[in-house]
Image (cartoon, rainbow, N blue to C red):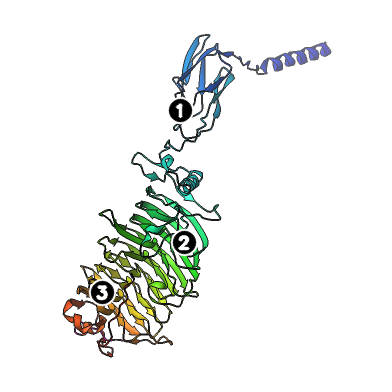
Amino acid sequence: MKVSKSILTVLFGAVVVMSCQPKEEVKTVYTITVDRTAIADVAANNPGVEALVITTDAPYWVLTAPDWVTPDAKQGVGGGKSTIVSLTIASNYKNEATTTYARSGEIKISGGNTSVSIPINQLGHTAVVDPSSSIGGIPSLAEFLDFVNTVNNGEAPIRWMNSKMEVELQTDIDLSSVTEWTPIGNVESSGNGNNASGAKGEVFSSVFNGGGHTIRNFKATKELAAGETWGLFGYISHATIKNLNLEADVTLSATGAADAGVVVGTAYCSTIENVHVTAKVTSTAGASTGARFSVGGIVGFMFSVTESDTVYDSYVKDCEVTATVNMDKGNNTGNGATGVMYGGIVGFATSVKEDTACNHIENCVHNGTMTVCIPRCSGICPTANCGTYIEGCTNNASQMNTFENGRVGQICCNLSVRSHLKDCVNTGDLTTTDSQTTTGALVALMGDDTAYIEGGDRVANTATIIGGNTKYLSLLCANNNKFDHLSDVKLAGKLGVYKADGNHEMYAISPATIMDFIGYINAAYAEKVSNITFVGEATDLPSTGGGIDDLSPVDDTWN
């Protein structure tokens, strides 16, 4: 009996244990069917609407799709019912002249512990390149380089024009992959004598609108041959360049008379406006003596003319250059219009002497440093030869110039026939080291009866001017040899004679003595000077006296 009772007890315990084990949950797998196994070859343009019929016995379903596919329902009730879902496909198309790539994805329907995927494929568009068909602008580096080649092949750049018939940049451009630059408007010869209309080759004659975008990594080392002109744009004629930012690093030299600008080599009857340049400009070799080599932060050579009784002026306005400049004369030791020159905005500006056409340099700013050994260097335009108006411009760049017997002014070096300065300002310190170099805070020389300088509301100079030439050293214009008038100028700053040991001999300047330091005044023109005032802080340093009045007249006009 005891044994039997024990067996019953064990059996009963087993039954109890078995009755306490949890039951496994049974998952129901429902079915989903879709009336299509794939959606293929959807059109790129006007793709329309696709449809799916979803049937499932699951309680519900959920649909996901690529971001370029919009379903009219993303979830629904199943229970054996069928649902039609409409799919709106976005266009994969820009315009007839733009290539687009095909794209693929999948539409996934899930519910009831199962899912179904339907692949979807949309076609792209392969453009037929038609130069007479516009794509509205330049959208990429490849298109930009095609634009350059088109201009230089003598074809109209219609493909990249917007509705205003302007070639418009639609994105920033990185030129770091371009190892050798061919300018836009790459002429064989610029005809850069007195009349720049003698260009041979294809020029740029349209409107280039940068759209506020930046061209970066414009880097080049270029030796210019005689008659050559070079820049991002080589030669432009009756053209406009505007709303562009440019970052550049260029090293330039010349074997003959040549012109180079960071933006434009030669601007003939053209306009450059609202262009901003950040650059490093280096030149180690000028041409042989007697061959002009002009370099500009914006334009190398600027020209205006009257054609068929119509006056075509040239303009550079509302532009700004920030540059680190290192230039040497190379083999060209000549002074004057046939030397090496750098202008922060324009290198050389002129028109025909007897013409009425003018070059306008307006509201431009130059920043940075100029460390040079060249005969003419200024922050705005070293040679304002014939018909050049410089108005509302500012130079903030310092200059150290070691050239022997040069003419150096921080706004302009030579102001000549029908040329003038109005309301221009220099804040950049200037040091020239040679005892024969004419040195002026604003201008080195006025050399024609039609040239003049007028001030404005701003103080024309606030910088320190140091020069080795005690005869032609000025807080204004160093050599006022011939001019129409010199008036209404406010001055400040300091003036001193260069000493190699750095202990420069500084002049004592005050409101009472300022006329001694505005530069040489030809006695025959003394009555043409009026209302020059010193508004800076007066010093009590010893003065060495006034200007020089015994210089024979200078004729520096270049025709």
- The Cα atoms of the two marked residues, 2 and 3, are separated by 30 Å
Say what amino acid the circle numbered 1 marks. Answer: Ser
Does residue 475 appear in this view? no
Query: Residue at image x 43%, y 87%?
Result: 501
Q: Nearer the viewer, residue 373 or 485?
A: 485
Query: Residue at image x 49%, y 62%?
Result: 250
Q: Position of residue 218 (x, y in %)?
A: 49, 56
Left/right of residue 32 with respect to residue 552 in the rendered view: right
Q: Quadrant of residue 279?
A: bottom left
Q: Which residues are magenta?
A: 506-512
State which tag comes first along the sequence, 2 or 3: 2
Name the residue that disc number 2 marks.
228
Which quadrant: the N terminus?
Answer: top right
- The Cα atoms of the two marked residues, 1 and 2, are separated by 49 Å
The circle on residue 448 is 3
Q: Residues within 10 Å of mark 1 (few under 14, many from 20)?
A: some
State which tag comes first along the sequence, 1 or 3: 1
Determine whether the residue tagged by mark 3 lies in a helix, strand or loop: loop
Q: Residues within 10 Å of mark 2 (few under 14, many from 20)?
A: many
Q: Is residue 509 magenta?
A: yes
Give the vertical position of 162 relative to 344 (above or below). Answer: above
Name the residue that disc number 1 marks.
91
Say what amino acid the circle numbered 2 marks. Answer: Glu
State which tag comes first along the sequence, 1 or 2: 1
Left/right of residue 283 with respect to residue 3 in the rendered view: left
Q: Position of residue 141 (x, y in %)?
A: 50, 46
Overall secondary structure of the magenta section: loop
Q: Nearer the viewer, residue 92 or 309?
A: 309
Say what amino acid the circle numbered 3 marks. Answer: Asp
Q: Position of residue 415 (x, y in %)?
A: 29, 72
